[in-house]
Amino acid sequence: MKRMIRGLAPVFALAATGAAVLAGAPAATAAPAHSAAVLEVKSATWGQLHVGDCEQDNGTIIIRSNGTGDWSATTLTFQTHSGDVWHSSFDFKTTAGTQLFSAGTFDSPRMNDGNPPPRYPWGKHFTYDASLFSAVNIFKTIQHSSC
């Protein structure tokens, strides 16, 4: 007959942790929840924009407090067989309108028309100085576009 002694598993675990500490190796412990950095996000979306024969739908810019950002949009062209390209760049500003930094120029894939015109979803990743995140008023962001 096997006999199970309750309470030894925690003793062995404690002994293993203590041995790791005594040996100079870090003990495996869970970090307190409050010490984890919270990733903050700001985003803005443009509805439908037109430049020449081109259209941009639901362009969205996202910046994160860790200094990364992403741009995504769907673009199309109405009258080009030679391959239009949508170009976007962005100026990020404070609430007072002071420019903090720029991102882009981001270029869409080459687009051709059709009936109906094909839609081209695309996006770009970028980085910026994370120390500027808190000063950005995302709703003052200006998109510069050409096609």
Image (spheres, rainbow, N blue to C red):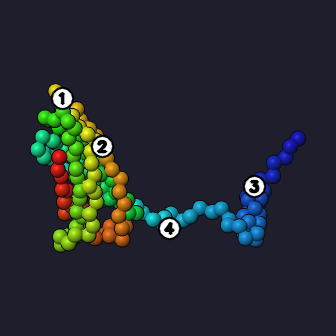
Q: Are marks 3 and 4 in contact (CB under 8 Å)?
A: no
List the residue tagged with mark 1: 114
Residue drawn at (13%, 46%) of the image: 51
Identity of the amino acid at label 2?
A: Trp
Residue 35 badge: 4
Q: Are marks 2 and 4 in contact (CB under 8 Å)?
A: no
- In this picture, residue 129 sits left or right of residue 33: left
Residue 13 badge: none
| Quarter placement of the N terminus | top right
Q: Check disc 3 and report its element: helix, strand or loop.
A: helix
Nearest to N terminus: mark 1 or mark 4 = 4
Q: Position of residue 101 (x, y in %)?
A: 27, 67
Relative to 58, is 38 above or below?
below
Q: CA distance from mark 1 to mark 4?
A: 54 Å
Residue drawn at (22%, 44%) of the image: 85
Nearest to N terminus: mark 3 or mark 4 = 3
List the residue tagged with mark 2: 122
Work out which residue is located at the far top of the displayed protein and give it. 115
